[in-house]
Each structure stands twice: as C-alpha cells, then as structure tokens.
Amino acid sequence: MKVSIELIDISQKEVLRDLLKNYLIEIHHGGDGDFPWLDTYWQKPNRHPFFIKADDSIAGFCLVNEHTLINTSGKNLSEFYIKPEFRSLGIGKQAAFLVWDKFPGPWEGRQIKENPKARTFWLKTKGEYTNNQFIETFMDNELWSGWIQTFDSSSKKS
C-alpha cells in the first residue's frame, strides 16, 4: 500500500470537515465535532491541511500549523487522524514521517492527558523517526494539559 500526503484544496473542505467531526467526537467521546479553526487552513499561509492517502483512498488527515507552546518557532502537527478501517497498517507512521520530512526544522506534537493511547503511538513513532532524539514534557496549565514532544526533523537520525 502506497502512503502519501496531499494538500487539501478548499473545494474539498467539506470532506475534511466530516473527517474532523468523526475525529473530534472520538477523542472527546461525544460532542458536536465542531472545529472552529477549519477556515484558517485556507486563510493563513502558515497552516497546511493534508489528506493522508492509502493508494487512492483517503485514509485520514493531518493539520500542520505554527501554534507551538514550547518552541518559539517551528511546526506543530496539531490534528492527526486515521480512519478506523485504516488503523494498524502502518499508515499513520508513514504519513507522519512524510509530513516531518516535508517541513525540515523544529517540531512540536501534543497529546491531551485523557488520550494515553495517542501518546503511546506518538512516542513510538517519534522514537523511530528520531532514534529517540526528542524531548518530552508534561504541561498542566491554562494553555495545555498533557504531553508535548519536541524534536528537529532537519537532524533526523533514522
């Protein structure tokens, strides 16, 4: 299976909106699935929406921005979702590697404390990508409550 990332054109915004609803309902165990920053991904130059493709099928999405909490500059893989039927196939890992390679430099990734399963995935994936050359911090304040990993993809070790 060939994994790729594809920049999402604004004409496909509703497809992304539907995926975001499923993602948000899943991580928050309910709710309305509203993502208030969706339009900014076509309005601001430092935001990048991608479909994650497995062969020709949309397997998920990832959103990249520069809203970081630890790095003063860098990218943040802010939202990342693989549809249930595409999980456990290595697609998420391959897609993350493609995104980090696309934007060499400092990165930050976060997981809410209520989602330890996501943390497990990201520790393994970032560990493999960086040869465990990342820093993890736990933050619990008004800005964030959960884990944050930082690393530099321009000095990739794998």
Image (cartoon, rainbow, N blue to C red):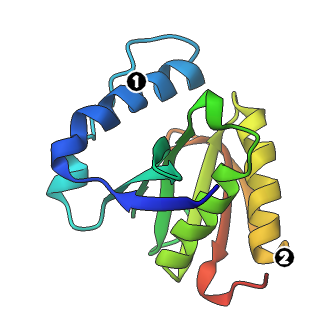
Q: Is residue 11 left or right of residue 152?
A: left
Viewer can see residue 68: no
Numbered label attached to residue 40: none
Rendered view: 108 above or below 129: above
At which x and y percent is residue 74? 47, 73
Q: Dividing the picture into quarters, in which one does residue 98 lie?
A: bottom right
Q: Residues within 10 Å of mark 1 (few under 14, many from 20)?
A: some
Q: Secondary structure at mark 1?
A: helix
Q: In the image, residue 133 lies at what x, y percent? A: 80, 76
- Image quadrant containing the N terminus: bottom right
Going from N to C along the chain, the mark reached first, 2 or 1, is: 1
- Between 87 and 29, which is closer to the camera in this rendering? 87
Give me the residue at 29% from left, 67% from top. Answer: 46
Query: Quarter-wise, where is residue 20 in the image?
Result: top left
| SS for callout 2 | loop
- Give how far apart the Cα atoms at labels 2 and 1 are: 34 Å
Provide the residue designation for mark 2. 131
Q: Amino acid at mark 2?
A: Asn
Q: Is residue 24 left or right of residue 43?
A: right
Give coordinates of residue 19: x percent, y percent.
Answer: 41, 31
Q: Position of residue 25 (x, y in %)?
A: 50, 18
Residue 21: give its label. 1
The total number of labels drawn is: 2
Q: Which residue lies at the image location 71% right of the left edge and 40% below the top edge?
A: 118
Position of residue 45 relative to residue 92, above or below, is below
Task: Write the residue at 63% across / 29% down.
Answer: 85
Farthest residue toward the bottom?
155
Q: Nearer the viewer, residue 121 or 111?
A: 121
Give left or right: position of 98 versus 51: right
Q: Amino acid at mark 1?
A: Lys
